[in-house]
Structures are given as structure tokens and as C-alpha cells.
Image (tube, rainbow, N blue to C red):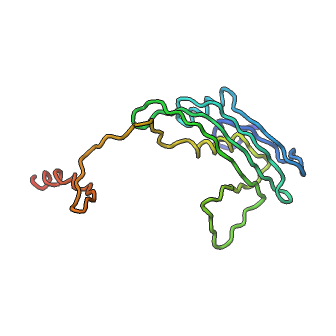
Amino acid sequence: MPRTDNHPSPPVEFSRPIEVSRLKGTVGQDFAIKPDAQETANLTALFKASKLSKVQFNGTIRPFGNSEWELDGQLGATIVQPCVVTLAPVTTRIDTKVHRLFVREIQLPDEVEIAPDDDVDLELLGSTIDLGIIATEELALSIPEYPRADGAELARVYDTATDDAGQIRPFDALKPLRDRLSDS
């Protein structure tokens, strides 16, 4: 249905919505999704990758509590990105577990304590659960931010000085500039 307001919907690169009303109330529903060729091209462009392949998202959505849902899944993909140092292609295999709870409302206590090893994401339950968007979000979190080819190292841009204790003093590299500015 087209929107009637002046705010267009953002493009969605990969979408596989499941109507919550169609989920069976007492048993889990298995899923296995893959993007088609156009969706794969859209995701490749979104992630500024050279190539994206073997994207597969499998799992189960099952009831949780009275009217909430739990998703457990496994996401896999292979991505090729340019090395941040050499621009050589860097291939990374991504295999990550996905766990989400879809709840009617989120109530946080006055003092929120988040455990660093807590792998559960809470989401508000709407009329649909979009598996494609979940897969896209998880890929975005799993893709290396600065891929580096084996053996690729950044060249030293400037010399650093060390003090008597062997500690690096990077601002000493600016001393020649300070001396030139003070001479003028």
C-alpha cells in the first residue's frame, strides 16, 4: 500500500516478513531464507563489498510466554571486501547465531544493568517479523569494519621519539613544525 504522507519509506534491501497472526500459537515454525540475485546485489551495495555470496538464514520462531515470540537462528554468508591497506580482496566467512525476543512491551527497571555476554536482543512485537531485515542487521554487525589482507601493515607516516623509559612520545614528531612556526 503506497504511503500518503510526504515521508517515503526507506528502501529495504532484503525483506521476508512473516505475519505474526499466521504463526501457530503452540508450536515453533522453522524458516530457511536466502536473498535472490537482486537482493544480494542490493546487500552488496549496502555493505560496499566487492562480492557477497552464500547468504543463508535458518532457524525457528516459537512461542514465548503468552503472546510473545522467540527467534533462534544461524546466519551464514561469505563477503569479499577490499583491504583497507592494499585494496587487495579479503574474503571473510560469517557464521553467527541470532537470538531475538519479540515482546509486547519493554519494561526497564529504574537501574538497568546489561551483562556484556548477553546475546539476546529484545524487540517490540509488531504485526510482522521481518526475517530479511533481521538477517541484514546481523550481517551489518558481523562484517569486518576494517578488513586487512594477510601481512598488510600500515606504513609508518612519521618517526616517533621515545623518552628515557622507552615510552613513545608521538608529539615530538611535531617539534620541527613548532620550531619553524616560532622562527617566523
Image-based side of 2 in relation to 177, left or right: right
Task: Using the image as rendered, state which of residue 3 and residue 164 is in the foreground.
Answer: 164
Q: Position of residue 51 (x, y in %)?
A: 56, 29
Extreme left residue here?
183
> What residue sits 87% from the left and 44% below the top?
22
Query: Taking 20 as reference, is 103 above or below it?
Result: below
Task: Give the tally of numbered discs.
Answer: 0
**Quadrant, the N terminus:** top right
- Camera-side residue of 139 and 9: 139
The spot of residue 111 in percent (x, y) is 63, 72
Q: Quadrant of residue 162?
A: bottom left
Residue ID at (64%, 36%): 13
At x 84% / y 53%, what residue is drawn? 63
Most extreme residue toward the bottom is: 110
Task: Give the answer, above or below, for where 151 lies relative to 106.
Answer: above
Residue furthest top in the image: 37
Q: Quadrant of residue 7?
A: top right
**Above or below, comparing residue 108 to residue 23 in the picture:** below
Which percent across, then down, holds residue 105? 75, 61
Tell me the quarter of the picture where residue 152 sits: top left
- The spot of residue 110 in percent (x, y) is 66, 73
